Amino acid sequence: MASTLIAVNSRSSSNLFTTDVGASVNENGLRSFTFQSGLFGSKIPTKKLSLSVNGTRSTRPESVRFSGSESVKASSRSLDVVIVGAGIIGLTIARQFLTKSDLSVAVVDKAVPCSGSTGAGQGYIWMAHKNPTSDTWELTKRSHQLWKMLAESIRDQGMDSLQVLGWKKTGSLLVGRTPEDSVMLRKKVSQLSEAGLRAEYLSSDELHSKEPFIYVGADGGAAFAPDDCQLDAHRAISYIEKVNRSFAPKGRYAEFYHEPVTGLVRSTSIGEYEAVQTSNNTLYGKAIIVAAGCWSRSLMHDLLKDSNVKLDALVMPRKGHLLVIENFNPLQLNHGLMEVGYVDYQNAVFTSGQNNQSQTLSVSMTATIDTMGNLVLGSSRQFSGFNTEVDDSIVHHIWKRAGEFFPKLKELPLTDFIKNRKVRVGLRPYMPDGKPVIGPVPGLSNLFLATGHEGGGLSMALGTAEMVVDMVLGNPTYIDNSPFAAKGRCC
């Protein structure tokens, strides 16, 4: 399954607000500091802000209009950047601001990290199934480069990247069982090689020598990308949180978890949205970034409904299941595996009734061994709104589909593993055109979107963070950002 799903059994956490903003306290008990970065280039001048010791403003802000269901709260804090969403996208954007600029950042979420989409996927950082001609290719490639650089920097600091990130260079295998699949896989290898990646085609026998437990028949084969990697989302998030929190004593970082966003505050003088209203706080920021996954569409609709800004983010929840078998010894894997059908989501399609409505699902085999030695099998795709209930029929279909590639599983009824079985059910943030929305909301220079990565949240996170920060700071982006603009896609 793709790397962004919502875990059924997520970790719990208390409110993790770390500190208020400020660098020094003057004789009147006010904290003050100057932001030196040229946010939006020269569009917004550098300002000196005065905050009270507890982080509230010392003077009333200018007249504002509120967009939302509640009145503006008295408790307020001022920062440079406010990020809505503490998934892998939101937290890596925060990290990029903190490490690559001198701006202050707040992260807001209705829950805690890894309780949403980030924590439930397989964690693969793979290129074998990607299309070099797609708009997301360069973003994905850049993100993978940045993940590898991060893993190397962790090792350079004397730490183990496996322990810190769950980082493993496993290589990936895109496998097929028919002559038609083999033709497609040979073409895939040629495309990947021409795009500068190491890739090779493996015959059925060559594949079997690398993965003894898999069976694809005499006509099958695989595309092998030896440099592909995988990580553990929970460990990666934990590390990113630790990095972000290291900036809290400097007055540059704060977390507001368990605080749903209820509205936006708009300045009457410049017409821009200047603050995020949560259930407990008003957070003023020069830039506001919405990275709320599949909830971004409904959230933006609610936040902008009383404004003259017309935006439909188009992000839809795409439900999926993953099956995790803990301490599974009968089947050992040396690489990450995925069937050809995953690429176009058309293999193993069947119909299931739910709420008296017929729904089409696709199930494609994916298989990995995580950092704890658990077997992780996927994956399904289904449009069913925001329903995250486990469907046992889909779980059994995933097991059956995996058994078609791994005969050993056919000998083992799934009921034998009921005590060691976990099911992750979640919602991928799906965009109809297959690429995320990254950039400013048309007509609002300081309100940004970073959402719609479907199953590639982990895979594209670092490249997305780099792009967003460069756009906010007015810097040239490392790769072309125009394919991801909201204009023409969400208006």
Image (tube, helix red, strand yellow):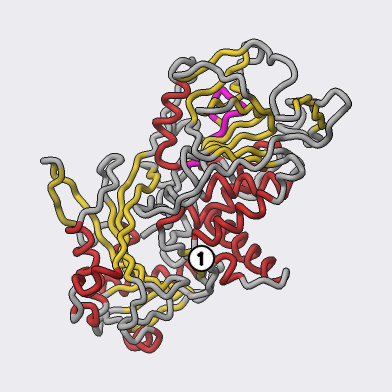
Residue 352 among those drawn in magenta: no
- Going by the picture, which residue comes out furthest to the left? 356
User: What residue is drawn where x is 41% and y is 78%?
Assistant: 201
**Region in magenta:** 441-451
- Majority secondary structure of magenta residues: strand
* 135 relative to 357, above or below: below
Q: Can I make out residue 215 in this image?
A: yes
- Which is nearer the eye, 273 or 145? 273
Vertical relation: 291 (above or below) 487? below
Q: Residue 300's x, y, as percent?
A: 45, 28
The residue furthest right is 27
Tag 1: residue type?
Answer: Leu
Residue 38, position in %: x, y? 77, 34
Is residue 174 visible in the rendered image? The answer is no
Name the residue at 43% across, 77% down: 335
Image location of residue 8, percent across then percent down: 34, 52
Q: In which quarter of the image is the C terminus?
A: top left
Determine the image quadrant of residue 106.
Answer: top right
Quarter of the image containing the N terminus?
Answer: bottom left
Q: Is residue 222 left or right of residue 133?
A: left
Q: Quadrant of residue 69?
A: top left
Which element carries disc 1, helix, strand or loop?
loop
Residue at 40% x, 85% y: name it. 210
Looking at the picture, does residue 474 appear above or below residue 153? above
The residue under label 1 is 231
Side (left or right) of 180 relative to 110: left
